[in-house]
Amino acid sequence: MKLRILGIESSCDDTSVALIEGTENSVHVVKEATRSQINIHKLYGGVVPEVAAREHADVIVPLIKKMWSKKLKPDAIAVTAGPGLITSLMIGVHAGRTLSALTHTPLISINHLEGHIYSNWLAAHTKRIEFPALCLVVSGGHTELILMRCHLQYKKLGATRDDAAGEAFDKIAKLIGFEYPGGPKISLCAQWGNPATIAFPRPMIDSDDFDFSFSGLKTAALYYVRAHAEIMDKKNTTARANFCASFEKAIVDVVVAKTIRAAQQYKVKTVLLCGGVAANNLLRSELKKMVSLHVPTSVFRFPTAAHCMDNAAMIATAGYFKFRARQFTTWQKMKVDPEWEL
Ligand code: KG4
Ligand code: ZN
């Protein structure tokens, strides 16, 4: 049976609305539109919650109008209800509730992380992703390893004890003068560098759990910059590239090592990568290589770069599976939960 789902995402600094169609075999995007607020927040060096909420409020109605048509009326509306910035979440949730009340369309609450996970099902043959699956979620706010034995069931194996991987990228990028969000800029600069130049620590790489910690690495990078003035010299492209490459490799080594160990321990059939940092080319290529070397019975998958970032198509895709499982609610019952744990 074909189902059409409208997705709404506004948990941080991207307003996104998408219409997807799902069948037994595949899920595909009919149309989608995302408004990024990066150009506004980079003036402040990071996301300012009140500014983000005002921007969401300005653009969400025009975006919904663009995605909505009587001919393609959705069967359900899927909205990110948490985790995220409460003021940002409220804009998307209230838009979804209003639309649901006026059009008598069921509402589906989506956890932002489950949205990221389901970005892997976008444009994929839905039956090709086999369980058990291990998901490495790496974003600006989260670094988690999640085991899925079947659709919509999540067991958290480990998570970061301090900063998320994306947060560590952004903070170190800011320190050396890159604009927010710095992750992609570090990655770009790292392309010309030698990752073996600086021996940064690989925190918790050998710990026998699946948790992460990036604050020690961040401090080591901070001390290194303080002791080596050339890193702050934008003309010294070699020193900066070597620094970025060494820092990026330290993060990638840790997340890849832990993912491989979890994949082996739980004998998963699929390894999924998602979240903003999943757009990182080194992470994609290293994980791909290590899965084929050390867990050859597993298939490695990752979303397109555009669907690694916050987007409503992934929220609608998670909504498609929840709606099929009859997990939906009404506008009266839908609540925002900024701390929602998967
Ligand atoms: O998932 P996302 O769009 O938002 C959150 O849910 O947090 O992730 C944004 C994060 C930012 O920290 C950004 O710097 C990071 O993803 N990021 C990257 C790359 N592209 C985005 N980090 C490293 N390398 C990249 N290529
Ligand atoms: Zn996200």
Image (cartoon, rainbow, N blue to C red):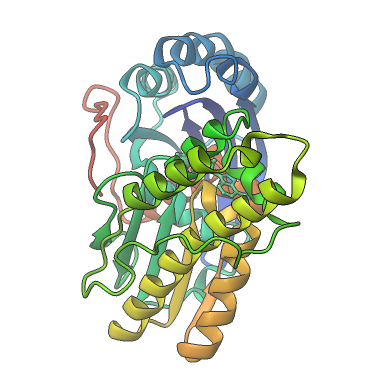
Query: Residue 217 at x, y = what percent?
Result: 39, 52
Report the residue at 47% width, 10% height from top.
51
Q: Is 104 situated left or right of 157 in this image?
A: right
Q: Is residue 303 left or right of 164 when viewed as pictured?
A: right
Q: How many marks?
A: 0
Looking at the rendering, which quadrant does residue 185 occupy?
top right
- In this picture, residue 193 sits left or right of residue 313: right
Image x and y of residue 26, in percent: 58, 63
In the rendered image, is residue 327 in sight? yes
Q: Residue at x 42, y 83 (%)?
A: 269
Q: Is residue 219 above or below residue 39?
A: below
Instruction: Answer with the quarter of the image where residue 338 lies.
Output: top left
Which residue is depicted at the point 24% across and 72% down?
Answer: 207
**Viewer-proximal residue among 83 and 229:** 229
Foreground of the two, 200 or 210: 200
Residue 310, x across and y down, in percent: 52, 39
Residue 76 found in image quarter: top left
The reply to whether residue 3 is visible in this rendering is: no
- Residue closer to the observer: 341 or 232: 232
Q: Nearer the viewer, residue 261 or 129?
A: 261
Tell me the residue at 37%/44% (across/down). Answer: 219
Residue 198 image position (x, y, % from top left): 54, 60
45 is higher (above) or lower (below) than 287: above
